[in-house]
Image (cartoon, grey):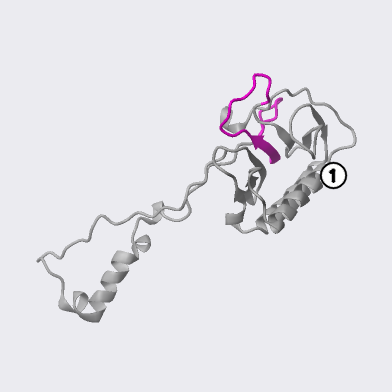
């Protein structure tokens, strides 16, 4: 599972004193001085190191890797297990579908009802992949960023991830969370559109367990 850190700002360690021990009255005294002190003390996000401020870079989502080349998928839906014992014959991270930029398409035979083996594979034109990415990214970005994460700690976490030149967008949810109608509509819409793009010609994928990008 991917990490999701909050924004951070550095608080100043203190203020530099004047060389002679006091500052001119027109700065520190009266309304102007109070305003300056207010800005310095309460406006600390504007006083830090610009190189360390702004949006903290979030760790990239964990994505299935193509067994033949190790390439990272650009579109996937994966189900990460929660904090619980796992059976020896249980698949670590079941996948409903994974798509690569070269057109490789892998999906679960249980889709759309459930993820997991057995898997089938085929190929679609790379241009079709780009259309899928653009459509899925547009739908996910129609949701407010704070509404895209609907996971519960230690519970099963399903992640729908889109990666393109425009960036990465993740929609996650746990079975314990009732999704709002707009989120559910987007979730269903993306899944339906992706599975509708499955190639007609397919074969068994021969994949028992996917390796993920954060496992290399």
Q: Is residue 201 left or right of residue 101?
A: right
Residue in the picture at 59% in, 40% down: 61
**Does the magenta portion include 81?**
yes
Number of numbered discs on residues: 1
| Viewer can see residue 165 | yes
The quarter in which the C terminus is drawn is: top right
Could you tell me residue 91's position as x and y percent? 68, 25
Q: Nearer the viewer, residue 213 or 209?
A: 209
Location of the N terminus by quadrant is top right
Give the residue furthest to the top: 88
Q: Residue at position x 66%, y 28% from top?
A: 70
Is residue 29 positioned above or below 190 on the image? below
Q: Magenta residues, as a range? A: 64-91
Q: Name the residue that disc number 1 marks.
A: 196
Give residue 154's position: percent from left, percent from top: 55, 37
The residue closer to the viewer here, 160 or 60, is 160
């Amino acid at each position: 599972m991917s990490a999701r850190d909050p924004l951070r700002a550095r608080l100043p360690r203190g203020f530099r004193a004047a060389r002679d021990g006091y500052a001119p009255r027109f700065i520190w005294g009266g309304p102007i001085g109070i305003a300056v002190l207010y800005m310095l003390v309460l406006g600390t996000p504007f006083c830090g190191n610009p190189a360390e401020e702004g949006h903290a870079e979030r760790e990239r989502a964990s994505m299935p890797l193509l067994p033949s080349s190790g390439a990272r998928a650009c579109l996937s839906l994966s189900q990460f297990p929660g904090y619980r014992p796992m059976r020896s014959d249980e698949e670590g991270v079941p996948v409903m579908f994974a798509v690569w930029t070269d057109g490789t398409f892998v999906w679960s035979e249980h889709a759309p009802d459930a993820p997991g083996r057995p898997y089938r594979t085929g190929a679609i034109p790379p241009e079709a992949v780009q259309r899928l990415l653009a459509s899925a990214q547009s739908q996910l970005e129609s949701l407010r960023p704070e509404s895209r994460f609907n996971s519960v700690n230690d519970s099963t976490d399903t992640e729908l991830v889109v990666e393109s030149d425009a960036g990465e967008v993740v929609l996650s949810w746990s079975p314990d969370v009732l999704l709002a109608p707009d989120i559910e509509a987007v979730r269903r819409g993306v899944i339906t559109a992706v599975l509708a793009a499955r190639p007609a010609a397919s074969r068994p994928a021969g994949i028992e367990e996917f390796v993920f990008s954060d496992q290399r």
